[in-house]
Amino acid sequence: MISLSDLVSRYPAMSEMTQTRFDILTGDSVLVMGSAESRWCGFYDPAQAALIAHWSSTVDDLVAGDAPMPALPVSRTDVDDVQVEFSDRMISTIPYQEADLMSTVYGQAYMRWRRMAFAGPRVA
């Protein structure tokens, strides 16, 4: 299991995260990933760091009254007239449980770690 300093070392953009927020997101990540680190073939810590960073980057900047942005990959942005186009076409090719993970580089990293740990047949 990672610590806050490990998370910040891996992802410096997380340097503003408080210990309390880290503890909450770590508990949530254990619910998703499980507590048996051995199942992850040595990839538990980097995968957990990526998942925590993903959740933090999608939620922690919101304050009361903010309209949440869709958690979809951005396919196009325009500077003039401020247009943002989300790649909702991708949703039809991604299982709905993973669609939000594609919206950040951290979520995509988590998916890579998870695929490396759980790809193919496993022999225990």
Image (cartoon, rainbow, N blue to C red):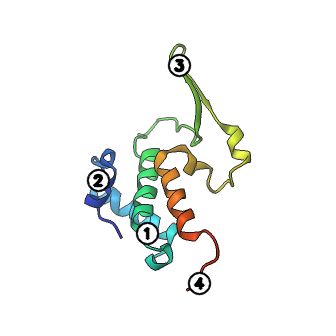
The N terminus is located in which quarter?
Answer: bottom left
For mark 1, give the secondary structure: helix
Q: How far is disc 3 from disc 4 in space, using C-alphas? A: 51 Å
Residue drawn at the location 53% of the way across and 57% of the way down: 112
Q: Earlier in the sequence, mark 3 or mark 4?
A: 3
For mark 2, give the secondary structure: helix
Give the numbered dot on residue 82: 3
Q: Is residue 39 above or below residue 6?
A: below
Q: Earlier in the sequence, mark 1 or mark 3?
A: 1
Q: How far is disc 4 from disc 2 in space, using C-alphas? A: 34 Å
Where residue 70 appears, as percent x and y from the top left, is 58, 39
Residue drawn at the location 57% of the way across and 63% of the way down: 115
Q: Earlier in the sequence, mark 2 or mark 1?
A: 2
Tag count: 4
**Label 4 sits on what residue type?**
Val
**Label 3 sits on what residue type?**
Val
Residue situated in front as seen by the camera: 99 or 18: 99
Give the numbered dot on residue 123: 4
The C terminus is located in which quarter?
Answer: bottom right
Q: How far is disc 2 from disc 1 in space, using C-alphas? A: 16 Å
Residue carrying label 2: 8
Q: Residues within 10 Å of mark 2 (few under 14, many from 20)?
A: some
Determine whether label 1 and label 4 are within 8 Å by CB.
no
Where residue 117 appears, as percent x and y from the top left, is 53, 69
Residue carrying label 1: 44
